[in-house]
Amino acid sequence: MKTMLRVAAAAALLAGSTLLAQAQQITEIKIGTEGAYPPFNNLNSKGELEGFEIDYVNMLCDKMKVKCTWVAQDWDGIIPALLAKKYDVIAAGMNATDERKKRVDFTAVYSRTPFSFIANKSVSSNDISPAALKGKTIGTQGSTVHANYLEKYYKDSNIKLYPTQEEANLDLKNGRLDYVLADKLALNDFVSGQGKDCCKFIADIKRDPAIHGPGVGMAVRKEDTALRDMLSKAIEQSIADGSHKKIADKWFTITILAD
Amino acid sequence: MNWCEYPGAWLGVEAIQNYGCRMFAGLGLTLQLVGLSVGLGAIFGLALALLKLYGPKPVRAVVTGYTTFFRGTPLLAQVFLVYYGAGQFRPFLDQIGLWIFFRDAFFCAAFTFTLNTAAYQAEVFRGAIVSVPRGQWEAGEALGLHRIPLFLKVILPQALMVALRPLGNELVIMVKSSAVASLVTLYDLMGATRLAFARSFDLSVYFFAAALYLLIVETIRRVWGLAERRLTRHLTHA
């Protein structure tokens, strides 16, 4: 009984203190990312997170004077884990789509990149119309804007969804897939690295605002409006003062804020 | 409305209604995958058990190595090894004409599951055959039966009775383990459920999937109960 009371008291104290922290200024943020989407976010061979988003968000944290810690989470569960309060922010190359906005809120956009098809080098046609890709096997990561796009427009193609983008790339290299659709910059990493002997860019797709949204933002829980506004302000500031560009240039050769 | 949308409509859960058809199609794929691999695994497993019991010494060692490997490593690792490993050996597989099989995710999963369950079933059969008393062999020999009919008509039926329960367990375990197929792009019950959850963010689809798995397992349990009562009807039930 005594222990129970103590536990209850401790829990009450803890709950009280988090409430206080919420009312006061935000000093600590936990950030969730996927860690399998280089060069945006990636777990390297040492088990450390690296990539544009890691550097960029850490820089924002420094500027906002908050302590940021990172959590790696599988893509499929990345929004449910945010809602379950495993972390407070998602920074994982997530496009701010209407579908996702039903569950979470997004900050200002910090990346907007083209989406492209890649294929085996033996493919000679640049035609990526649904008619041309009829009957072909196209791979992409599940639960992404790309999966939605393929299901909407490429109904006559055989669509395969993978837990991570890396596995889709690997299956293109292995020859199980004819095409892969994803973010151009993430694919660039593959086409100029691991897949440089097998695969090449075919063409960019035309954005569909209903599917793709305005671009990549960070996701927060709907009730955390103060956090959302704080992050949005920091993002806008970093774009205005050039610090966003400085970090982007370290990871990418072309702009990641295309119109 | 399709029949597969009724459970969701009846429960009043939109996500289950919207993705009901995909989930039932997934259930079908799960049953195919498990049925095929456990069926083939039984034939393969029995052969392995016989080799392990009566084969020449080097063969016994190989079979022991096989069962140790497949029972000692995670099924997920085995599936990845076959699925992505086959991709690495594509030129070779192309040459011997096997790539068309390994290109297909269903084949890769069914192939791995068969090898895996065969290893477990081999141990079940081996144990069951050993459990038949030595006197049964001697009695058969005394009647002048040859070794092969003696094994098929006297030993095996008694061994199968012993093996029945563990084989049922193995089937149940395979039904549940087959969920790893969803990680190599297959839309089995788990794969379809993951897709439904990723779209709807509604946890109830997982409860529905759990209920479907439970339904299969409970059906197997009951069928097994009936089969056992029938096979042991000559023994007095206390």
Image: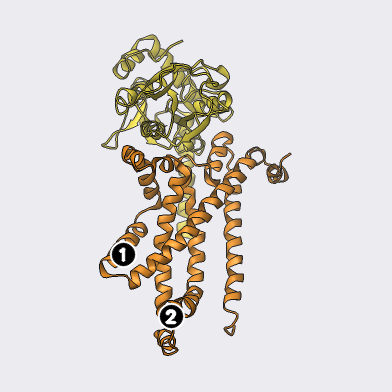
Chain colours: A yellow, B orange
Q: Position of residue B54 (x, y in %)?
A: 34, 73
Residue bearing the label numbered 2: B132
**Secondary structure found at label 1:** helix
Residue at image coords 59%, 57%? B216
Q: Is residue B220 visible?
A: yes
Chain ID of residue with mark 2: B
Rendered view: B209 above or below A224: below
Q: Earlier in the sequence, mark 2 or mark 1?
A: 1
Q: Are marks 2 and 1 on the same chain?
A: yes
Front residue of A123 and A47: A123
Front residue of B8 and B167: B167
Q: Position of residue B56 (x, y in %)?
A: 28, 70
Q: Is residue A110 visible?
A: no
Rendered view: B85 above or below A242: below
Q: Label 1 amino acid?
A: Thr
Direction from residue A105 to residue B135 in the image, left or right: left
Query: Mark 2–mark 1 contact, CB under 8 Å?
Result: no
Residue at image coords 44%, 28%? A178
Residue at image coords 48%, 38%? A77
The quarter holding residue B1 reads top right
Chain ID of residue with mark 1: B
What is the number of the mark on residue A245?
Answer: none
Q: Position of residue A107 (x, y in %)?
A: 48, 21
Front residue of B150 and B225: B150
Residue bearing the label numbered 1: B64
Question: Label 2 crowding class (10 Å Cα cut-off): few <14, some 14-19, many 20+?
Answer: some
